[in-house]
Image: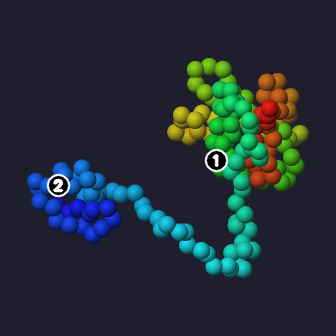
Amino acid sequence: MRFAPEGEDFLDVCPLCQEIAAEYGWVKEGSPTTPTFDEEPRKRRFSLGAFLDPRRAAPDDSLAPEPILRRLSDQERAMVEAAELFNSSPYRRTVGGIGKSLGEPHASVVLLSGVNSEVVVTVAWDISWYQYRVLPESAQPVRLAERGHELAELEPSFRTWNARVEVDGRVVPEIARL
């Protein structure tokens, strides 16, 4: 059997010493290892094409523009986690695209009561609304549950607008700061 001591080349190790080599952290040939990275990241050359690429500007992934100076309650934490799951789903782009046509929407993030931690994300305009169910433990954590045309079709609890929607479709819960 062959082993590599701490990033060096592989060496032949006798069957009696294989256990000792493993105890010292030597890597067995053919076993999975974590990727290694250079100490200093490579510097990219400036390219005008890359600079002008519209895909270059990635959205900021942080939900809060400034830190919240208190601990979040369980309900607030569930709202933030549901918003993060929604924002990483393809539905974020859908909402962003619709927003370009219909303008800025209203949004709510509501934690449902019950045993599971299901959250309802509602995004609504004057002429259309969409409701997404977010269940973090599910294989498909975000799914489109309902949609409609009139805001009056929504239950009042889902019309408590406690979130905002960014231009790119990201849902950001409004959480009080200290």
Residue 82 x %, y % = 66, 37
Query: Which residue type does callout 2 highlight?
Result: Gln
Query: Which residue type does callout 1 highlight?
Result: Ser
Residue 70 x %, y % = 72, 32
Q: Is residue 24 above or below residue 148?
A: below
Mark carried by residue 89: 1
Q: Which residue is at the front of the view, 24 or 169?
A: 24
Quadrant (top left/top right/bottom left/bottom right) for the N terminus = bottom left
The answer to whether one can see residue 135 in this image is: yes
- State which mark lies toward you, 2 or 1: 2
Q: Which residue is mark 2?
A: 18
Q: Is residue 156 left or right of residue 10?
A: right
Question: Picture quarter containing residue 45?
Answer: bottom right
The answer to whether one can see residue 133 in this image is: no
Number of other residues with Cα within 10 Å of mark 2, as a class: few under 14, some 14 to 19, many 20 or more: some
Q: Which residue is at the front of the view, 35 or 102?
A: 35
| SS category of the residue bearing label 1 | loop
Question: Picture quarter containing residue 156?
Answer: top right
Q: Is residue 125 left or right of residue 132?
A: right
Question: Picture quarter containing residue 160?
Answer: top right
Residue found 63% across the figure and 42% down from its top? 85
Q: Is residue 90 left or right of residue 127?
A: left
| SS category of the residue bearing label 2 | helix
Residue found 11% across the figure and 56% down from its top? 15
Residue found 24% across the figure and 67% down from its top? 10
Q: Mark 2 or mark 1: which comes first in sequence?
A: 2
Q: Is residue 87 above or below residue 14?
A: above
